[in-house]
């Protein structure tokens, strides 16, 4: 019997894999990547990304703590790990 991941876990696994692979290669931000978002998605995430960019050189400890809490709440053990890799990538961008 195969155990299927919930939507939350599958999405976190996708992002964890994405950021893990990027952390092993030279960082490159493609302008085309933004085109993958729908206009509705862009409207939703833009304020969060803008707020994050204000402090992207910071350690991201509060964000990570909140991510860990959320991951436990929805029973998604990879959420905080994917978030940690995202924070590290953003810190690399700010450097």
Image: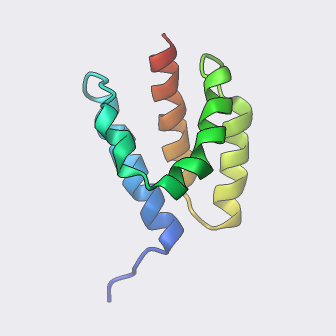
- Residue furthest to the bottom: 1
Q: Is residue 42 visible?
A: yes
**3 sits left or right of 28 in the view:** right
Give the colouring mode of the picture: rainbow
Q: In front here: 7 or 61?
A: 7
Question: At 33% from the left edge and 84% from the top edge, which residue is drawn?
Answer: 2
Residue 60: percent from the left, percent from the top? 66, 28
In the displayed orientation, state which residue is furthest to the top. 95
Viewed as shown, does residue 43 lie left or right of 82?
A: right
Q: As drawn, is 29 to the left or to the right of 87?
A: left
Point out the image quarter for the N terminus. bottom left
Please report the residue visible at 29 percent of the width from the left and 25 percent of the height from the top.
28
Quadrant in the rendering for residue 30: top left
The answer to whether residue 89 is left or right of residue 44 is: left
For residue 78, say whether it is visible. Answer: no
Is residue 53 positioned above or below 57 on the image? below
């Amino acid at each position: 019997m195969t155990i299927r991941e919930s939507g939350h876990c599958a999405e976190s696994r996708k992002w964890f894999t994405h950021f893990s692979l990027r952390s092993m290669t030279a960082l490159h931000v493609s302008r085309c990547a933004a085109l993958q978002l729908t206009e509705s998605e862009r409207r939703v995430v833009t304020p969060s990304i803008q707020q994050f960019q204000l402090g992207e050189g910071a350690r991201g400890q509060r964000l990570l703590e909140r991510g860990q809490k959320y991951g436990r709440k929805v029973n998604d053990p990879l959420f905080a790990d994917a978030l940690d890799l995202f924070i590290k990538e953003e810190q690399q961008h700010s450097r």
